[in-house]
Image (spheres, rainbow, N blue to C red):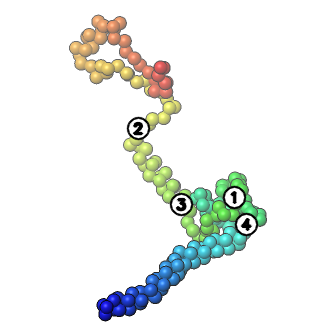
Amino acid sequence: MGSDMILAASSGGSGGFNLLLLLAVPVVFYFLLIRPQSKRRKDQMQMQNAMEPGARVLTTSGIRATVVSVDDDGLLLEIAPGVEVHFVKQAVMQVLKDDEPEELDDEADDDELEADEDAERVDLSKDEPAEVDLSKDAAGDAADLDDEDEDDESKPKAKAKAGEKPSA
């Protein structure tokens, strides 16, 4: 009977710990998940409402644009000179700084590298169609050439232009 009293006393203390654990889990979730997400959402709403014409923005689809005008629920963005598109305010992910470099400079460097490599490349443009020999014995030995003279009618050679499509 004495051992039953000891077990009852020790199990009584774990009830307070369980209650503390049940209260601690929601508090941890609030501080780690809910509060930061709410703060980010509030900052995003503030940024979207404070947009003015002339600001450079980045949309959620990755388009860099300049704000032309702001309406109650939308924006008019200029994505290229003379190209204006209507967006909702929620489509703007961030406002870009003016000193942020454009990534178009990288494309100019790539064009210079391609110009250097053009001398080593084969031109595959369709401007000047070239004739292609489609016969099986294009490499041909001298003996094969003699046989070809005799069998011209039995083995016709097929030639096609590079720009033409074969018929079915």
On the image, numbered disc 2 is attached to which residue? 122
Task: Report the residue at 51% width, 83% height from top.
Answer: 23
Q: Residues within 10 Å of mark 2 (few under 14, many from 20)?
A: few
Q: Residues within 10 Å of mark 3 (few under 14, many from 20)?
A: few
Marked residue nearer the N-terminal end (4 or 1): 4
Judging depth in this view, the residue of 80 and 22 nearest the camera is 22
Which label sits in the foreground, 4 or 1?
1
Q: Residues within 10 Å of mark 4 (few under 14, many from 20)?
A: few
Question: Can residue 91 be seen at all in this image of the molecule?
Answer: yes
Which label sits in the foreground, 4 or 2?
4
Tell me which amino acid carries mark 3. Answer: Glu
Marked residue nearer the N-terminal end (4 or 3): 4
**CA separation, marks 4 and 2?**
49 Å
Determine which quarter of the picture holds residue 59: bottom right
Marked residue nearer the N-terminal end (1 or 2): 1
Task: Report the residue at 44% width, 21% height from top.
Answer: 160
On the image, numbered disc 1 is attached to which residue? 87
On the image, numbered disc 4 is attached to which residue? 53
Q: Secondary structure at mark 2?
A: loop
Question: Can residue 24 be seen at all in this image of the molecule?
Answer: no
Q: Secondary structure at mark 3?
A: loop
On the image, numbered disc 3 is attached to which residue? 103
